[in-house]
Amino acid sequence: MGFETTVVISIFFVSVLVLGTNSYAVMSSSNDIVSDAEDIRYEMQYNKLNSAVTPVSMNFDNESSILTVEITNSGNIVLDSDEVSILVDGYLLNYDYYPETLKWYPGETKIFAVEDPDGSTNKRVKVVTDSGVTGYIGGVPSSGDGTIPDIDWDIEPPETEPEEFITIDMVGINNKNSQLVIQATNHGTNTLYADELSILVDGRVKLYSYSPDTRTWFPKETKTFIVEGISGTTHTKVDLITDTGISTTFSGVPEKIKDNN
């Protein structure tokens, strides 16, 4: 009887040790994963808060059909010149840049060039950093004939468009109705769902409505999102995030929208 009791106790003790060791390993691995995810999240937030780009001017060369845009890194962190997205009239285009240094330092102005065969008509150019921060310039480009630096631009032909890519085109404020109005475009090839987005205003998640009121958000379609209960024209930060984590950011003073009713 004593021997059997000893065997049972030994088996129980070994089982507890094995379970405890396995549990510790699982908990340690889980904590490491959570810690890594938090580090990535904080890094993304830091990059967004400290990134800013400001398009200064744009020129068009009729001979080469090259549209050049001077853009300043107006943020506080170093950006990568080849991790920027440039959209012209809603189309994502490949680009080259000068100076040809990969690092784009705060306060530095670079020239970005895209091939634009449409000519020097009115243009809308949006610049998007890898963290989703945007800059915008619109209007008729200056004629750059003879003034654009003689650079052998190396612009690759268009590639397949990304599956998910969204931009905020306009943010306005309707003070009479206390509404924040956000116009955004789906530039990707995937159909998105307007009711599966997250909209953050100054870091806080907000409820929203949208128009057209169809749930599907087709490629190249622009939708208007409305957040209630917001007024004033102070500096505002808006984040628009898809259910897969693709995001775009507006940071600035919303346009004033007049209510015609």
Image (spheres, helix red, strand yellow):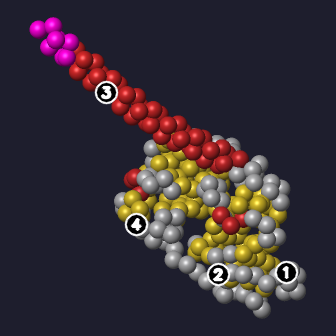
Q: Relative to 124, is 55 on the left or the right?
A: right
Residue visible at 31% across and 27% down in the picture? 19
| Whether residue 176 is visible | no
The amino acid on which the numbered mark 1 sits, given as a three-letter code, is Ile
Q: For mark 2, what is the residue?
A: 156
For the residues labelled 2 and 3, the Cα–Cα distance comes to 57 Å
- As helix, strand or loop, the secondary structure at mark 4 comes to loop
The magenta region covers: 1-8
The amino acid on which the numbered mark 2 sits, given as a three-letter code, is Glu
Measured as percent of width and height from the top left, residue 36 is found at 53, 41
Q: Mark 4, mark 3: which one is toward the viewer?
A: 3
Q: Residues within 10 Å of mark 2 (few under 14, many from 20)?
A: few
Q: Relative to 204, is 58 on the left or the right?
A: right
Queried whether the magenta region covers residue 5, the answer comes back as: yes
The amino acid on which the numbered mark 4 sits, given as a three-letter code, is Thr
Q: For mark 4, what is the residue?
A: 191
Among numbered discs 2 and 3, the one appearing first in the sequence:
3
Among numbered discs 1 and 2, the one appearing first in the sequence:
1
Measured as percent of width and height from the top left, residue 230 is found at 56, 42
Among numbered discs 1 and 3, the one appearing first in the sequence:
3
Q: Are marks 1 and 3 in contact (CB under 8 Å)?
A: no
Residue visible at 40% across and 28% down in the picture? 24
Q: For mark 1, what is the residue?
A: 148
Pick the front one: 174 or 194: 194
